[in-house]
Each structure stands twice: as C-alpha cells, then as structure tokens.
C-alpha cells in the first residue's frame, strides 16, 4: 500500500523532495522508502523516476489509488 501510495503521490506531478514524498507516503524516513522501492522495483528512485515511463503501468493508476485512499 505504501508503495502504491508513493506512485500516486509522484503521479500527481507536483515536484517534491524525496524526503517529503517518503513521509507523505507513510514511510518512517527516506532510507526506508528507498529500501522498499529497491525491493519492489529492483533499483532506487534516483535510478528510475516513477512518474513517467513503462514502470508505472505495472501498478494501479494514481486516480484509482486516490479514489480508494481519499485525498492526500
């Protein structure tokens, strides 16, 4: 759920620091987010921007996550 929420936040297109995204996404801190991101994606957020490209298509759309979780 946290990783999906992170995709939703990034998908909103608002430029934010990774630390802010980590905290808004429900992670304890940025290193926690990076570890989980690497586990699911196989690389770090710095190596692959999740806001664009093929990677995001493997997950639930940001609009659907927003509908399920409510406003961020």
Image (cartoon, rainbow, N blue to C red):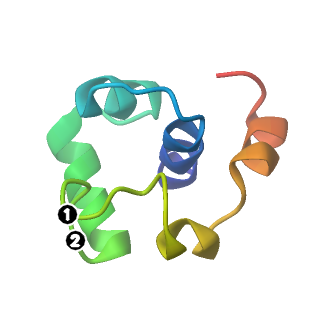
Q: Residues within 10 Å of mark 2 (few under 14, many from 20)?
A: some
The label on residue 43 is 2
Picture coordinates of residue 65 (x, y %)? Answer: 73, 46
Examine the rendered structure and indicate whether residue 32 appears above or below residue 56: above
Query: Rounded to the nearest whole Å, what is the CA distance between mark 2 and mark 1?
Result: 6 Å
The answer to which quarter of the image holds residue 23 is top left
Give the answer, above or below, for where 41 lies relative to 21.
below
Q: Which residue is mark 1?
A: 47
Q: Residue at x 52, y 75 (%)?
A: 54
Which residue occupies the foreground of this view, 37 or 51? 51
Q: Give whichever of 15, 41 is nearer the camera.
A: 15
Left or right position of 59 against 51: right
Tell me which residue sits at (27%, 26%) in the image.
17
Proximity of marks 2 and 1: CB atoms separated by less than 8 Å: yes
Which residue lies most toward the left here? 31
Would residue 7 appear left or right of 32 to someone viewing this image?
Answer: right
Badge 2 marks a residue whose secondary structure is loop
Q: Where does residue 37 sit, x and y in percent of width and height?
A: 31, 60
Q: Look at 49% across and 41% down and name the residue there.
A: 10
Image quarter hosting the C terminus:
top right
How crowded pointer 1 is (Cα within 10 Å; few <14, some 14-19, many 20+) is rated as few
Which residue shows up at 60% across the image and 43% down it? 8
Residue 2 at what x, y percent from top left? Answer: 49, 47
Count of numbered circles in the view: 2
Single out the mark in the foreground, 2 or 1: 1
For label 1, the SS is loop
Please tell me the numbered disc located at residue 24.
none
Q: Decide: is 1 above or below 24.
A: below
2 lies left or right of 63: left
């Amino acid at each position: 759920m946290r990783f999906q929420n992170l995709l939703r936040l990034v998908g909103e297109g608002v430029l934010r620091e990774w630390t802010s995204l980590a905290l808004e996404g429900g992670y304890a801190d940025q290193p926690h987010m990076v570890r989980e991101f690497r586990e699911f994606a196989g690389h770090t957020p710095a190596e692959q921007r999740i806001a664009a490209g093929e990677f995001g298509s493997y997950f639930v759309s940001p609009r659907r996550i927003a509908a399920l979780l409510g406003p961020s």
